[in-house]
Amino acid sequence: MKKSYNLGYYFSEGFHSIFTHGLMSFAAVMMIVACLLIMGSFSLVALNLERELGKLERDNEFLAFVDESYTREQAQALQGRLEALPNVAAVAFETKETAQQNYAEKYASDANAGLYSELPAEVFRDRYSVHVKDLSLLQATIDAVEGVEGIEGHQAAPEVAEGFVLIRNVATAIALILIFMLLAISLFIIYNTIKLGTFTRREEIAIMKMCGATNGFVRGPFVFEGMLLGLFGAVVAFFLQWGVYALIAQAIDTGDTFQLITVIPFGEIWNMVLGIFAATGLVVGTGGSVMAIRKFLQV
C-alpha cells in the first residue's frame, strides 16, 4: 500500500513539475523528438538498404562464359571448380541452345522478335550463372572465376553492388554517429531541465533529508519527471516518424527514379520503432534525472 502511495506521489509531483518549468520541459521534449526523428530516419534508411542489399545478394548473379574451344563435357566439368571458389553460393550451367531460347523469349514482345529467334545457337556461348554470398565481394569473386582455366569473359555490373554497399555503410555509420551525439545532447537538455527543478526546491529537499527522507523518496518525483518527458518525446517522435516515412515511401513507390527500390511497409516495423523510441526516451529521461538530482542529495 505504501509503495502504491509513493508511486502516486512520484507521478503527481513529476507531472506537476513538468508544467512548473514549462519552457524547459518543452525544450527537452522537442530536443528528444528531434534526436529520435533524425536517429530513426537514418536508421530506417540503413535498414531498408540492408534489406535491398540482402535481396541483391540472394538474387544477384553474373554470367561467366566458357571458352568456345571447350566441348560440352569439358564445359560442364568446370562446375565443380567454380563451386569451390570463395563467396560462390551456387553455380548453374546453361548451354548455348538454352541461352538462345531464353534470349528469344525475353524479347518475344519486341517488334524485332523474329530476328532474335532466328539467331543461330553458335552466336551464343555455353555459360555459368554464378550466385554470390556476399555482394560486397562481387568484384573479387568475378576475378576468381575468370582465373579458372576455361572461363573467358563475364557479364556483370559490380559498380551497382558496390554503390549499394557504399550507401548502406555510409548510412549506418552516420546513424551510429548521430545516435551517440544526439543522445548526449538529449541527456544534457534533460539534465538541465531536472536540475532547474531541483535547484528551485533545494531547501525543500534539504528539509526532507533532515527529517529522514531516503534518497529514493526524494529522487522519485524527479526521475518520474524525466521518464515522462522522455516517454512523451518518444511518442511524439514515433508519430512524426510514421508520417515522414509514409510520405517518403509513397514518393518512392510512385516515382520513376527509384523503381528498383522496395520500401519496407511501416506496418511491418512499427512495433520495433515504437519499442526502440520508447526505450531510448525512458533511458535518456531517467539518466538525465539521476545525474541532475545526485548533487542535491548530498545533505
Image: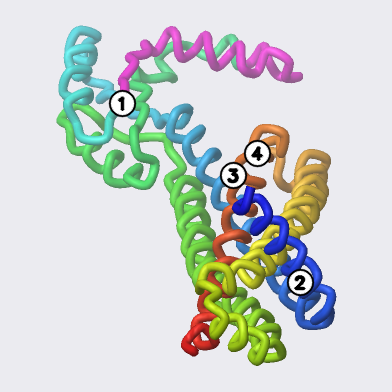
Answer with the quarter of the image where residue 149 lies: top left
Q: Can I make out residue 206 in this image?
A: yes
Q: Is residue 225 magenta?
A: no
Up the image or down, 127 lies above or below 175; here it is above
> Residue placed at 44% from the left, 28% from the top?
58
Q: CA distance from mark 3 to mark 2?
A: 26 Å
Along the line of sight, which residue is nearer the eye, 105 or 167? 167
Badge 1 density bin: few <14, some 14–19, many ≥20, Cα 10 Å: some
Between disc 4 and disc 3, the foreground one is: 4
Badge 2 density bin: few <14, some 14–19, many ≥20, Cα 10 Å: many
Sequence order check, earlier mark of 1 and 4: 1
> Residue placed at 63% from the left, 61% from the top?
281
Answer with the quarter of the image where residue 68 lies: top left
Sequence order check, earlier mark of 4 and 3: 3
Magenta-colored span: 89-115
> Residue placed at 45% from the left, 51% from the top?
165
Amino acid identity at mark 4 = Asn
Image location of residue 17, percent across then percent down: 77, 75
Image location of residue 176, percent across then percent down: 48, 64
Q: Is residue 90 magenta?
A: yes
Amino acid identity at mark 1 = Ala
Answer with the quarter of the image where residue 104 lies: top right
Q: Which residue is mark 1?
A: 89
Q: Which residue is mark 3?
A: 48
Sequence order check, earlier mark of 4 and 2: 2
Q: Which residue is mark 2?
A: 30
Amino acid identity at mark 2 = Met
The numbered mark at residue 271 is 4
Under tag 2, what secondary structure? helix
Check if mark 3's residue and mark 2's residue have beta carbons within 8 Å: no
Between disc 3 and disc 2, the foreground one is: 2
Image location of residue 208, percent across then percent down: 61, 81
